[in-house]
Amino acid sequence: MQINIDNIFKSGAITEEDYKKSGNKIPEFLEKIEARDQGFYQIFEDEDFRVEVDKIKIFAASVEGKYDDIVVCGIGGSALGTITLRDSLMPLFSIPKVRLHVMENIDPDPLAEIVETLDFSRTLFVVISKSGGTPEPIAEYFYFRDLVNEKGLRATDHFVFVTGPNGFLHEEAVRNDFPIFGVPENVGGRFSVLTAVGLLPAALIGINIDDLLEGGRQMSDAFLNNNFDQNLPFQIAALQFLSQKPQNVLMPYATKLRTFAAWFAQLLAESTGKDGKGLTPIPALGVTDQHSQFQLFSDGPNDKLIIFIEVEKFKQNPAIPVLVPHAKTDFLKGVDFTTLLHAEMAGSAQALTEKKKPNFTITIDEISAENLGALFVLFEGATAFLGEFMDLNAFDQPGVERSKVLTREYLGKKL
Ligand code: PA5
């Protein structure tokens, strides 16, 4: 993985000197992050965590062939990483052997619709909630559990929980003898994709979770490196902070990474939006958004940092057969889809730079489990550093907690 930041300097948003100088802060920031007792970068070396990963692999192997549909009930940090893993690493259009559905919302139509499509006798419900007390997954659990009961199926064959030790869902799992996978106490929801939260659903649909973890481990080493040139997460955070733009666009040029940008949006918004401060994330997709949001990025207010993600090589790369030779289609002669995609990205980056809109590019060689693991920890680490740059606690979410309390009040119920 590499980053190309030439356009940041050309746009005039940051000087190379300030950027390099910021590296002095790495040791101080790492100390502060350590004092916040966060485990997202420590799990890779943790013995208990390795045991949990083995448990996940054993469970996934033991149920292979038993289910056609996996239904995840979870929201926020307990859903977005799983959606990203599925969309990035599984085929987008062909029907897979095991389908993974993430019920991340509670509007009744999709819930009723999915029930129509499921063969409950071949469905596993994975209920995910770190706190074990979030209204949405609890309500969904009751809904699906009732239907499982109604169909006369044995609930233990159809439910598995990923949850912390102190909430209602943990009690419920114990009461019913459901398999339980834990979430390390010191890994927050939006930082938890590389725990059982994302790893269990991933393993159930055949994603190689060792590769994911290997990518994450390598990036966590970079995160802990005091050498500025080696610390990619710190470099990203420095660019996000020093450019002083209140909005951050994440624009991967790969359809399979569309939901990675949605995962990033939660991470940035929930981590930095506090104390009257915050960076507003804007998820985008190249090239699609060149014909949608890009006009605003290019000619609108200069209040955005645009982060591109480029994929060097795709699994397939058909040539574009120029079926109608014409002066106006000649530019496509001898061109394949990857080359066209790259040219469009280069054009967009240059167009932004000409308008003094800061942008930089992260390049990965391919979309793989290892690169995904690394990308997750890259942005998690960057967000942790960004919290220190912005002098706020990136790891809490008081606004979210408040809305959970008020939901109960609106229903006329006590906590
Ligand atoms: O990042 C966070 O902590 C939140 O977005 C949570 O992931 C979200 O509120 C869901 O919480 P839980 O997993 O406890 O159900």
Image (cartoon, grey):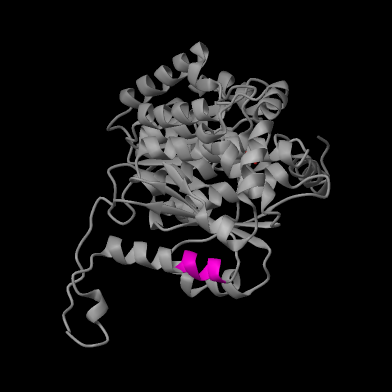
Indicate whether 164 appears above or below 247: above
Residue 319: x and y, percent? Answer: 19, 65
Residue 125: x and y, percent? Answer: 46, 36
Q: Quadrant of residue 187?
A: top right
Task: Say which residue appears at 78% left-offset and 38% top-offset.
Answer: 391
Q: How many marks?
A: 0
Pick the quarter of the image with the N terminus.
top left
Residue 334: x and y, percent? Answer: 18, 70
Q: Quadrant of residue 35?
A: top right
Task: Say which residue appears at 35% left-offset and 61% top-offset.
Answer: 342
Left or right relative to 399: residue 218: left
> Farthest residue in the top direction?
47
User: Which residue is nearer to you in this view: 155 or 72?
Assistant: 72
Task: Say which residue appears at 51% left-offset and 29% top-offset.
Answer: 222
Camera sees residue 105: no
User: Which residue is nearer to you in this view: 150 or 254?
Assistant: 254
User: Which residue is nearer to you in this view: 295 or 133?
Assistant: 295
Residue 361: x and y, percent? Answer: 48, 53
Pick the quarter of the image with the C terminus.
top right
Q: Main secondary structure of the magenta part?
A: helix
> Farthest residue in the front direction?
17
> Farthest residue in the bottom direction?
327
Left or right relative to 271: residue 156: left
Q: Report if residue 290 lies within the magenta region.
A: no
Camera sees residue 21: yes
Indicate whether 357 appears above or below 229: below
Indicate whether 230 appears above or below 9: above
Q: Which residues are magenta?
A: 348-354
